[in-house]
Amino acid sequence: MNYSTIKKTAVAATLVAALGFADTAQAQQVFGGRSQYRTWSIGVQGGITTPNALIGGNNNFGQKVGYFQNKVGEYYGLTVRKQFSHLFGLEVEANRGKIKTYNHDESGPAFETFSGSKLGRAQSAETKVNWAASLNGVFQLGTIDFLRRENAVNFYAKVGIGAFAYNPIQYSNNDFGGTVVYNQKWGEDVLGDRSPSEPQDKEYRLGMIVPVGVGAKFKLSEVVALNLGYTMNFTDEALLYGPGRNTSTKQRFANVYGGLEFTLGSKDKQNLTFANPVATMYDELKDPSLRNEVEALKQRVSTLEGTVNTLSADADGDGVSDKFDKCPNTPAGTPVDGSGCPIKFPEPVVNNVTSNGYYAPIQFEFDSSVLKTESYSTLDKLAKEVRDNNSSVTLDGYASAEGSEAYNLTLSKDRANSVKQYLVNAGVSSSSITANGYGEKNPVASNSTEEGRVQNRRVEIKK
């Protein structure tokens, strides 16, 4: 193998590795990181060879295409692979075996002994591949998961670069026997009459090999997979089958193989080779523990929804949950305190408005400046009156005596501004509204009881 071939091999190997790592970098982490998967595997394989590939070829031995015949030879080896993502892995492959071909008519060049006697033409050839080694990039084309996901099928393509050592032997008949008319092996003279001083050939020739193939893997268990494939092997050699009619044509051969692949590592981790992002989304179909967990979460949600419905139930519509309503069945529109009981005012109230136009205070929950829904009708009536009469209104906010005075002062201002914002949203000019906060001042009831404190959490409306 000359320097040019070595250089080509090094460049191609670099490209294969760079392509693989670029794919891995693009994929970045695999579903949370490769550490949660098994990524190493070893495989054994065996099969047959043929002198041609699917895309055609010339074994440089036949007189013409219609004459030479393909014979099958044995081919076997092993692989070691590292999977970097569910899309790509790098594989080291080593093989050895034989490639055979023959022709009905004599087609090889004529040979003669050292003494000049003729040996005749070669009619068949057997090339012994002592070893072939390559670095392959393996691209996962797709994984099919079945419903139970204990079994899966993975389709892949591979391309690599490497070297091989081979010894072509040519025979004078077509059954790979009889007279040997050519043998590359070192030190072997076919008739034994070679001169001792004559330079001897090397035992094996070295060449470059580029395997390109496709295959499918069938997951048999968490450890073992059946591997079936077809590989076209392109070489940089014109003497793959020995001397022929055209010594410049680069030769090729193909092999069909089957074997077993064994995944290394803990069985508790998934095999990255068969990782399927789509199928992972449907783990609930397979994993009973995950399904039970989902069902438990659904039950908890249903329970919480029931609790929320119970807490939000308000039969009389007074804004106080039935669970806390001490005065159920309050007439619609009646102002109530935090316990759901009507608030008593000095004058009779109709729709939250006294007979002399006095508006009942707007009540608030403890430590809250959020308006109650029952206040909306009162504020809508107030907004309409202010707009129609082009008048103004003053809002005085108050708080009960819990907490510090400074906090309650801020809370009372927030309550007054909450009412103001509602009126502004209802079309009242902001300049027509004055909002004040007085904190704990001017209580309308005692702060020593809850009933009194409920009444003190208010905003008074003054026109």
Image (tube, helix red, strand yellow):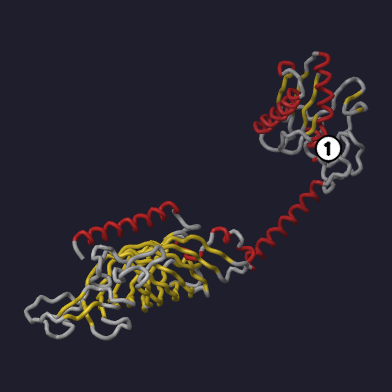
Where is 199 relative to 374, above or below?
below
Question: Do we see residue 267 in this rendering?
Answer: yes
* Image position, residue 110 (x, y; %): 20, 75
Residue at the location (22% across, 73% down)? Answer: 109
Q: Dot 1: what SS?
A: loop
Which of 21/405 is in front?
A: 21
Q: Is residue 122 left or right of residue 450?
A: left
Q: Quadrant of residue 358?
A: top right
Q: Residue furthest top?
A: 390
Q: Residue furthest left?
A: 197
Q: Is residue 61 left or right of residue 273?
A: left
The quarter in which the N terminus is drawn is bottom left
Residue at the location (30% across, 82% down)? Answer: 176
Question: Do we see residue 100 in this rendering?
Answer: no
Where is 197 relative to 28, above or below?
below
Which of 288/200 is in front?
A: 200
Task: Characterize the local packing of mark 1: few (<14), some (14-19) or many (20 or more) Cα atoms within 10 angstroms.
Answer: many
Which of 242/381 is in front?
A: 242
The quarter in which the C terminus is drawn is top right
Residue at the location (29% across, 85% down)? Answer: 177
Mark 1 residue type: Asp
Q: Quadrant of residue 245?
A: bottom left
Q: Quadrant of residue 107?
A: bottom left
The residue indicated by pointer 1 is 337
* Image position, residue 203 (x, y; %): 19, 77
Which of 21/258 is in front?
A: 258
* Image position, residue 429 (x, y; %): 73, 17
* Image position, residue 106 (x, y; %): 28, 76
- Tag count in the figure? 1
Q: Is residue 186 left or right of residue 259?
A: left
